[in-house]
Image (cartoon, rainbow, N blue to C red):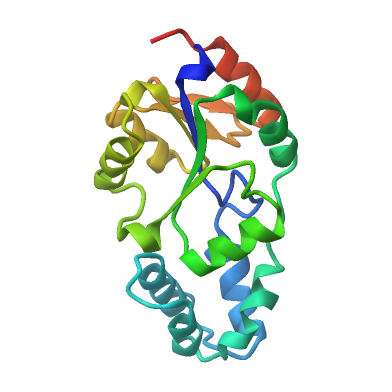
């Protein structure tokens, strides 16, 4: 595939950042440690509301029993995925554009990408709290296609959650499942284990 004709769209959690399930792995333990709610279901429900733009980031922290002042300490829990920065720096200019599509809270996403110096490597950030939709809702992929103004097949979408990848494939995006260490396949879903593998896989894609 000629990457110069394609727009690369990367997920954040589990692709750009190491924690794939950031709610279970990072957020719930952090809230509990800080003396907030101990109920994982309640924390998850408030997070979902915030990630849909129904709660501000400050309102989220208050809802789980904490001060918004803990936010920056929480965000320190995140780490960049190995190889992500080097891949973007070396390969990003080969695409017609590089974007991020993430289920996240807008304020958190902004702080993280500034912390890891990703703003100059990823041109556009599409965050669920700003859109009002979350993956794998098919409407978010339809919105993405319309917003990017290109053919769905020319969007290379990379996500660590198979449900998100399969939903993107149903909307005819070129969908890749990232971080599948088992090397499993489901139908026509492509899989890759790392950013080094991703580079090779994209180069091998047939032209469309």
Q: In the rendered image, which quarter contains the C terminus?
A: top left
**Which image quarter: residue 113?**
bottom right
The x, y position of residue 123, in whole percent, is 53, 42
77 lies left or right of 132: right
Q: Is residue 201 above or below residue 113?
A: above
Examine the rendered structure and indicate whether residue 154 appears above or below residue 98.
Answer: above
Where does the image place residue 159, in percent across and percent down from the top left?
50, 40
Q: How many marks?
A: 0
Q: Residue at x 34, y 29 (%)?
A: 169
> Residue 61 location, x and y as percent?
51, 84
Left or right of 34? Residue 40 is left
x then y, percent, for residue 143: 28, 44
Q: Residue at x 56, y 62 (%)?
A: 110
The residue drawn where x is 44% and y is 71% is 47
Q: Is residue 49 above or below residue 9?
A: below
Residue shown at 39%/20% (left/top)?
A: 188
- Above or below 102: residue 94: above
């Amino acid at each position: 595939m000629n990457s110069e004709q394609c727009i690369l769209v990367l997920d954040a959690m589990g692709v750009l950042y190491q924690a794939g399930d950031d709610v279970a792995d990072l957020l719930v333990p952090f809230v509990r440690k800080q003396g907030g709610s101990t109920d994982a279901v309640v924390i998850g429900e408030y997070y979902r509301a915030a990630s849909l733009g129904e709660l501000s980031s400050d309102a989220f922290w208050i809802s789980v029993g904490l001060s918004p002042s803990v936010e920056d300490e929480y965000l320190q829990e995140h780490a960049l995925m190995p190889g992500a920065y080097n891949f973007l720096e070396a390969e990003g200019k080969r695409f017609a554009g590089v974007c991020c599509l993430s289920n996240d809270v807008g304020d958190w996403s902004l702080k993280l990408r500034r912390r890891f110096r990703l703003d100059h490597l990823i041109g556009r950030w599409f965050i669920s709290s700003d859109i009002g939709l979350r993956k794998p809702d098919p409407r978010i992929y339809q919105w993405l296609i319309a917003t990017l103004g290109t053919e769905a097949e020319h969007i290379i979408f990379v996500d660590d959650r198979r449900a998100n990848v399969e939903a993107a494939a149903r909307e005819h995006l070129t969908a890749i499942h990232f971080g599948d260490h088992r090397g499993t396949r489901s139908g026509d879903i492509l899989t890759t284990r790392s950013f080094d593998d991703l580079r090779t896989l994209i180069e091998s894609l047939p032209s469309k």
